[in-house]
Amino acid sequence: MTEDVLAGDGVWSDESDWEITDLAGEHEGEEQLAMPTLAVVGRPNVGKSTLVNRILGRREAVVEDIPGVTRDRVSYEANWSGRRFWVQDTGGWEPDAKGLQQSVARQAELAMRTADAILLVVDAVVGATATDEAAVKMLRRSKIPVILVANKVDDQRVESEAAGLWSLGLGEPRMVSAAHGRGTGDLLDDVLAALPETPREGAGAPGPRRVALVGKPNVGKSSLLNKLSGDERSVVHDVAGTTVDPVDSLVELGGKVWKFVDTAGLRRKVANASGTEFYASLRTKSALEASEVAIMLIDAGQPITEQDLRVISLVADSGRALVLAFNKWDLVDEDRRYQLEKEVDRDLIRVPWAQRVNISAHTGRAVQKLVPAMETALESWDKRISTGRLNTWLKEVVAATPPPMRGGRLPRVLFATQAGTRPPTFVLFTTGFLEAGYRRFLERRLREEFGFDGSPVRISVRVREKRDRTKK
């Protein structure tokens, strides 16, 4: 029975089989563990993200054979020999970087200052460069343990060349091949010896609600995250697509801790993407699936685009609570506001239930209104209606507005139950199929009666199978 309900519309034959458990289940509150952080730093294209993936034992960090793919500092949870810790991937650090690369370098420097231990990755084939020496000089001023990693040591021939890295003054270089896994086990043993049991700055807050920032490129997701956190958490630049990896941030708002994930902007369908964009799209989808509520940023000063609608459909299909944040509102005049209302009525007809907030990520205008919008959406997303109350309401609605005839017969709605939450999922047991238009009518009345602002609502129909009543 439960498998049938999960599958959607279908048939049922046993009228006694009416008690349906919560199929969606309840998400257990995730404890934000107080784990130490290992920062992986170095100049561009030395294999930092490849090493991060090797440490994790899975492909999480975006990797491509060009420098500068990683830009933000991105945290992943790792486990080695039963000990858990955060691994923070960073963009390439250069002492004299300009423009976008300067922002990337600042993110790497912030990771160096806040980590509990650092892996300085050097290309063993190229040897120590002036940039490597500048990084060592900066790291020596801190009291954080630093482990020198000689990467790309694929064979014994390179080992002799890597020995020259002793000259950097950080002790013995740990020789590894991140691409092939050579030496990474021994390196991780050294990492555990260097990491403290608890982070220097204390534990994180327990059980934060998870928020995904989504939208097309250059709509202001990273600017909003920085404004909310009061910290330059994500790299912001005029270049569209600056964010590649999802960037996690714990932010305290309204007396609560929220876990925000700044995602890469989705330019096109994943099937049509390639290289970095392909993996960034996959990680954006993964971040959305791991979230509870999504803040969809839309440029209020521009017409709603096909890209915007595609991302909104992605959120709706994922079943996540949704807040629509119309950004750059400070730049919108009266004519544009009038036109935008017409576009919302015409183009966003699929998500009329979404919470809506007009903000400016640049100036901070009305960003505080996002908190009550998220709280309302999550309350709806978690809401459960008792079976008795639900069926009392349903009986009144169906009596006042019966379903349309189908095949000359009037379908009867016999019973309803809420099969799950997150999102709220309802199952109707009937004697005949209910038209899509009537189901939309029931959803609208359901929202009016019980209030599901900000959350999708799913309704499936189970049609009673005719029984063979022929006497033997």
Image: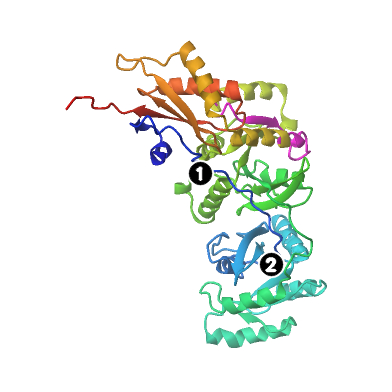
**Dividing the picture into quarters, in which one does residue 203 lie?**
bottom right
Task: Indicate left or right for 349 with 437 as reference.
Answer: right
Residue 39 within the magenta-colored segment of the rendering: no
Residue sitting nearer the eye, 63 or 61: 61
Name the side, left or right, on which 88 lies relative to 96.
left
Q: Quadrant of the N terminus?
A: top left
The residue where tag 2 is placed is 38
Badge 2 amino acid? Leu
What is the x, y in percent for residue 331?
73, 31
- At which x and y percent is residue 196? 73, 70
Question: Tell me, what colour scheme is on the image?
Answer: rainbow
Name the amino acid, label 1. Arg
Where residue 330 appears, x then y in whole percent? 75, 32
Asked whether the viewer can see residue 123, the reply is: no
Pick whichever of labels 2 and 1 is earlier in the sequence. 2
Question: Which residue occupies the foreground of this view, 352 or 267?
Answer: 352
Whether the residues at callouts 2 and 1 have beta carbons within 8 Å, the answer is: no
Residue 38 at what x, y percent from top left? 69, 67
Question: Which mark, by number, is residue 268?
Answer: 1
Residue placed farthest to the top in the image? Answer: 400
Q: Is residue 244 above or below residue 86?
A: above
Give the SS element for disc 1.
loop
Please tell me whether mark 2 or mark 1 is closer to you in this view: 2
Q: Residue at x 45, y 47 (%)?
A: 272
Residue range of the region highlighted in magenta in the rendering:
349-370
